Image: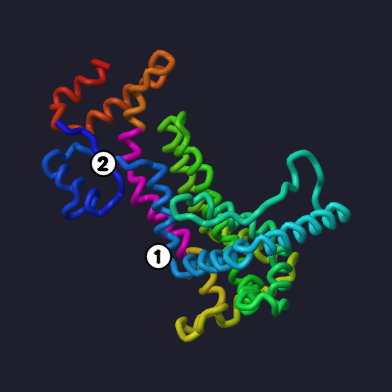
Amino acid sequence: MIRGQGYDGASNMKGHANGLKKLIMDECPSAYYVHCFAHQLQLTLVAVAKENSDCDWFFYQLKLLLNLIGNSCKKVQMLRVEQAQRIVEELELDVIQSGKGQNQEMSLCRLGDTRWGSHYKTVMRVLSMYPSIRKVIKKVGTDKTQKTEYNQAQTMLTIFDSFEFVFMAHLMQNVLGYTADLNHALQKRDQDIVNAVELIYLTKIQLQQMREDDGWDEFLKDVHSFCNKHKVKISDMDNFYRPVGRDRRFYVKIKNMHRFHVDMFLSIIDRQLQELNNRFDEVNTDLLVCMSAFNPTNSFAAFDKTSLVKLAQFYPNDFSRLELDHLPRQL
């Protein structure tokens, strides 16, 4: 009489061959598996990062950057001073506005696989504090008393000041930004399931629109604007790709346009969409939306006859054909 099952995503639990999910569904086809939506989203984002080499490279560089600056109170203070001076200068030039809650002091937060929101927050802060971070790296790279960090800073500056790093930072900011609101919504205790499912659909639509030609042009325009503002050399899309901090022998000879547009931009977005579709499949979402018709809040205001008929169709062993035909009139 099992009609549902749910647990973590370990292979011995939800594996397609011998996992507990498979063994139970062999006996009870209507024992649908529903995974925690918030946990699924975390796994989706982690899967994209681990399987895409460019994404993995970018977050590895972020870790090196955090180790270089965040492990020393002296360097953290240097960053704080540089950022404060920058804010004062931009206020004097009317580049930014002053006001309550604006221009708050920021720091670089640590990355954590179990707290994927930390990745989004770190990327946003790196872009926001970009010129200040670059100045700190330069100071460390010219200070020979820093010993091993002296050489690390010089290598990091080459990568940090490259178009490829800025491009990946903006791409991750966009991709993670579209899923950030969904991530927060799924973890709310008072989140109703219908709204959560609608947010999942909306996230997929936003990512799909981003991968269109207009989305690519708008994205590239933002990257170029950032590079011009901070004097980062823009790669010519008609030239051949030259990797930064990686040996070119590991890459085939292709143009920058193909490398940045197809291998990075489209590849990461498509992988994200594929993971979202695989983890948040139609059966799970439809099942939960239909179940929400049982919500007793406000005198069963969510009651919907069509949803309950559709829900009954998920359980053919419980309802005969005649009962399904009669169910709308019963409801």
Q: Which residues make up the magenta segment?
A: 267-288
Marks 1/2 in contact by CB < 8 Å: the verdict is no
Q: Residue furthest right?
A: 92
Residue 134 percent location from the top left of the image: 70, 68
Q: Identify the residue at horizontal 52%, vertical 46% (top origin).
A: 180
Residue 166 percent location from the top left of the image: 62, 66
Q: In front: 36, or 269?
A: 36
Q: Which residue lies furthest to the top in this view?
A: 299
Q: Is mark 2 on a helix, strand or loop?
A: strand
Q: Is 214 drawn above or below residue 1 in the view shown?
A: below
Q: Which residue lies furthest to the left in this view?
A: 27
Left or right for 268, reference 120: left
Left or right for 206, reference 74: left
Q: Identify the residue at horizontal 62%, vertical 56% (top origin).
A: 108
Inter-mark Cα distance, 1 to 2 = 25 Å
Q: Residue furthest bottom?
A: 249
Circle 2 Cα neighbour tier, 10 Å, few/some/many (<14 / 14–19 / ≥20): some
Residue 238 percent location from the top left of the image: 60, 79
Residue 128 percent location from the top left of the image: 68, 56
Q: Is mark 1 on a helix, strand or loop?
A: helix
Give the residue pinned by disc 2.
33
Tell me the chief SS of the magenta region: helix
Q: Is 297 drawn above or below residue 28 in the view shown?
A: above
Q: Identify the residue at horizontal 43%, vertical 30% (top origin).
A: 192
Q: In front: 301, or 58?
A: 58
Label for residue 51? 1
